Image (spheres, rainbow, N blue to C red):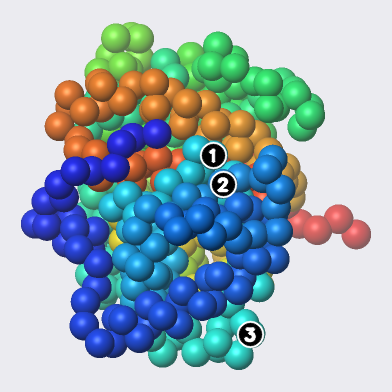
Amino acid sequence: MPPAPAVIDAEVWPGVARPPAGMKAQVAGRAADALFRAAVRRLPLRVEYPDGTVLGAGGAEEPVMTMVRPADFAVRIGDNGLIGLGESFMAGDWEAPDLAGVLEVFASSVDTLIPVPLQKLRSLYLPRAPRQERNTEQNTRGNISRHYDLSNELFANFLDSTMSYSAALFPASAGQLAEAGWDALAGAQQAKIDRLLDKAGVGEGTRLLEIGTGWGELALRAAARGATVHTVTLSSEQQALAQQRIAEAGFSGQVTVGLQDYRAVEGEYDAVVSVEMIEAVGYDYWPVYFQTIDRVLAPGGKVAIQAITMPHGRMLATRNAYTWVHKYIFPGGFLPSVRAIESVTEQHTTLRVRERRGMGDHYAATLRLWEERFLQRGQEVRELGFDEVFRRMWLFYLCYSRAGFQSGYLDVQQIVLDRREAQL
């Protein structure tokens, strides 16, 4: 666990350096404290306060949340809801030896943490997404850059040798995934990629479009099959490293890496593959994302995407929400439901979903390994210039994500689409 920051730079971390102040914040904090204490009393959790108070329905074996500055925690929650939960952890207002375990308890109870009458009022006081974070062609480059251009070295410190930043597919049953170790991760990432390439029919002579390059592993494996690959990204850092890896592997003649918005892609392709890119598209732009794929896909072509998904009802309820993840990790992002993908493609394209496989438990295992590696590489991350607030933020992000998959609140799907007519 990264230590609590001794001093927080208010210019770098304006939402974290100081808790909200003023009468309004104090009133909201008292209300939030009462709601939080009432909620945790029925959860399988132990919340320990400095005065010795212990709340929660859990026993000694349940995850522990230790309050360091409960008053600061309360005003942050009262002022900013779940954004305040993350910011209070970044500030060191609370600790948890098993952070993912604590967050999993909250994720499992997300629909009941706040009384239903108050849930209906959330839109009146919680923040809305800034207009500059909508994924227009003008804004998207900046949104992507804020995450993926942080530093290739940062990502290399917790990703495996394939530099794959998406769910792996382990050769293990659900019961064995908890035992999956670091040595299995690179092979599991390649297995994930190979399954997508197989489903898209990628082989010798295939003209492949990849939307979302990452650091080039999928393009490399497709080129090794004999495909010609055009892959696009909006991250200059990713483009540079992907081009380097492709050149070192001897595939520069088969692969082009474009610094390009997916909407600007031209040409015709036998297959389109996109791994965990739709999450960055934004709710309003899903039709144009799939219309672009439909436009460039050759007759008889296939599409294989990997997408993080959420339940349809939660998707509808949160599509206008501005969350901690938006503010600190993925500006402009939003997770689709499977039903939304099916609906958008049916209404706006000639594409149809033909096959899908859920593998959320594999993502939980992937995130566990990233989290362990990130914590092991704490000194290396610090030497790159990332402070303790950043390190706590990144840990919260990894654990927050893992909790979503462990609780079943999130899933990840490999989805195959094509234009085949429905069979009579």
Task: Find out whether the residues at labels 1 and 2 contact each other: C-beta distance under 8 Å.
Answer: yes
Q: Is residue 76 visible?
A: yes
The residue shown at (65%, 34%) is 362
Across and down, in percent, residue 193 comes to 56, 27
Residue at the outermost left position: 11
Q: Residues within 10 Å of mark 1 (few under 14, many from 20)?
A: some
Looking at marks 3 and 1 on the same chain, the residue that comes earlier in the sequence is marked by 1
Looking at marks 3 and 2 on the same chain, the residue that comes earlier in the sequence is marked by 2
List the residue tagged with mark 3: 116
Q: What is the number of callouts on the image? A: 3
Q: Residues within 10 Å of mark 3 (few under 14, many from 20)?
A: few
Residue 101 position (above or below residue 369): below
Across and down, in percent, residue 141 comes to 23, 53
Tell me the quadrant of the picture where the C terminus can be found: bottom right
List the residue tagged with mark 1: 98
Residue 157 position (above or below residue 94): above
